[in-house]
Image: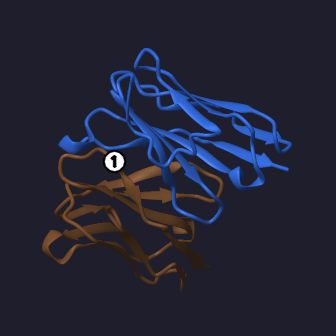
Amino acid sequence: GQQVQQSPASLVLQEGENAELQCNFSTSLNSMQWFYQRPGGSLVSLFYNPSGTKHSGRLTSTTVIKERRSSLHISSSQTTDSGTYLCALSNYGNEKITFGAGTKLTIKP
Amino acid sequence: EAGVTQSPRYAVLQEGQAVSFWCDPISGHDTLYWYQQPRDQGPQLLVYFRDEAVIDNSQLPSDRFSAVRPKGTNSTLKIQSAKQGDTATYLCASSRDWVSAETLYFGSGTRLTVL
């Protein structure tokens, strides 16, 4: 089955620094999505990005299928960016969606 | 449009007790997922439906867990005899058509504590 590895497991930055989060997958993918989760909160979709690069404000997602990786870049981080970032994906012709373990991001003021 | 609705928000049980979780997906979403998320871990798929049919329940502990979606709309996840290891947040999600670039929407989850 699909294996999903996220790195780093945790990341602590000062406000204003940039964050780079990685998601690596073991087999070809059909669809992938990045989510944000505040402690005790539900998951909120950030990007649906099975290939290429997408931007949303200070966030950028880049998925390179042949390298089996996707990244999430947060520029000029803010304390409100603190939380857990999860990637989720599925294989071709399959709606079974597998999540990574997440990256716990802490932004210090 | 209304989001994915789950209830109850919290549940606290003694070992051996039963509990049911309820999920109302977004209208028109034919695919519904149940995930278990232990503390500080990513969500782990338990079961998913397309309409009323179970597509994959291979990760559902069948001796104690059951899930139904009888009319292809609302769904119920039941734990027959809870164990401390079942302590986790149970998340329901729905999608119109994931494989055609439709995104996945989550409910607020039910936080279960088994004492």
Q: In which quarter of the image is residue A63?
A: bottom left
Would residue B6 be visible to someone looking at this image? yes
Q: Which sits in the foreground, B94 or A59?
A: B94
Would residue B101 be visible to someone looking at this image? no
Percent of width and height locating residue B29: 34, 28
Q: In which quarter of the image is residue A57?
A: bottom left
Give the class, few, some or many, for how many residues have Cα within 10 Å of label 1's Cα (few <14, many ≥20). Answer: many
Residue occupied by mark 1? A96
Percent of width and height locating residue B58: 44, 46
Q: Which corner quadrant holds the N terminus of chain B?
A: top left
Q: In which quarter of the image is residue A35?
A: bottom left
- Whether B99 is drawn above or below B78: the answer is below
Q: Which chain does the blue colour mark?
A: B
Q: Mark 1 lies on which chain?
A: A
- Residue, x 46% and y 41% (percent of image)? B47
**Amino acid at circle 1:** Lys
Chain A, colour shown: brown
- Residue, x 43% and y 20% (percent of image)? B73
Q: Which sits in the foreground, A40 or B73?
A: B73
Furthest residue toward front: B63
| Total labels drawn | 1
